Amino acid sequence: MAKVTVWFIRSLWGSDNFDWACVPSNGRSGGIILIWDDSLMKKEGVFVGNHSVSVEISVVGDEFRWVLSSAYALNSAAEKILF
């Protein structure tokens, strides 16, 4: 899926309380989607790489911040060296 839509995320999440960040698919790579309940967690920042996505999150009503991250490794030996 080259483009992630609100409709697609809602169909995965099953409720209207969500926010998300993604790395879209590229060629045969499937991409990455992070989804969270935005009534509980507030997005403070998003960091998107070629093969990773990280979201700085704070819990609603709390000053504590943390980072939720997801990454995938490449399959070819030449690409793994670059990763």
Image (cartoon, rainbow, N blue to C red):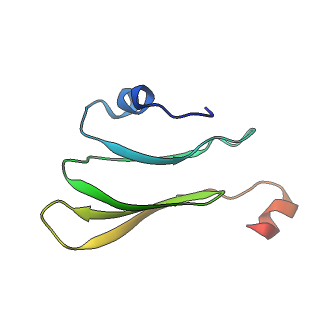
From this view, report whether residue 70 is shown above or below residue 12. Answer: below
Residue 18 appears in view = yes
Q: Residue furthest left?
A: 61
Quadrant of the rendered structure where residue 17 is?
A: top left
**Residue 55 percent coordinates (x, y):** 42, 60
Quadrant of the rendered structure where residue 49 is?
A: bottom right
Specify the quadrant that holds the N terminus. top right
From this view, report whether residue 30 is shown above or below residue 72. Answer: above
Which of the pair 65/78 is nearer the observer? 65
Q: Residue furthest right?
A: 78
State the residue at coordinates (70%, 42%): 26
Q: Is residue 47 left or right of residue 59?
A: right
**Residue 70 percent coordinates (x, y):** 51, 58
Q: Is residue 6 left or right of residue 70?
A: left
Quadrant of the rendered structure where residue 44 is?
A: bottom left
Residue 34 appears in view = no
Specify the quadrant that holds the C terminus. bottom right
State the residue at coordinates (63%, 34%): 2
**Residue 68 percent coordinates (x, y):** 41, 62
State the residue at coordinates (66%, 57%): 50
Which of the pair 14/57 is nearer the observer? 57
State the residue at coordinates (25%, 48%): 38
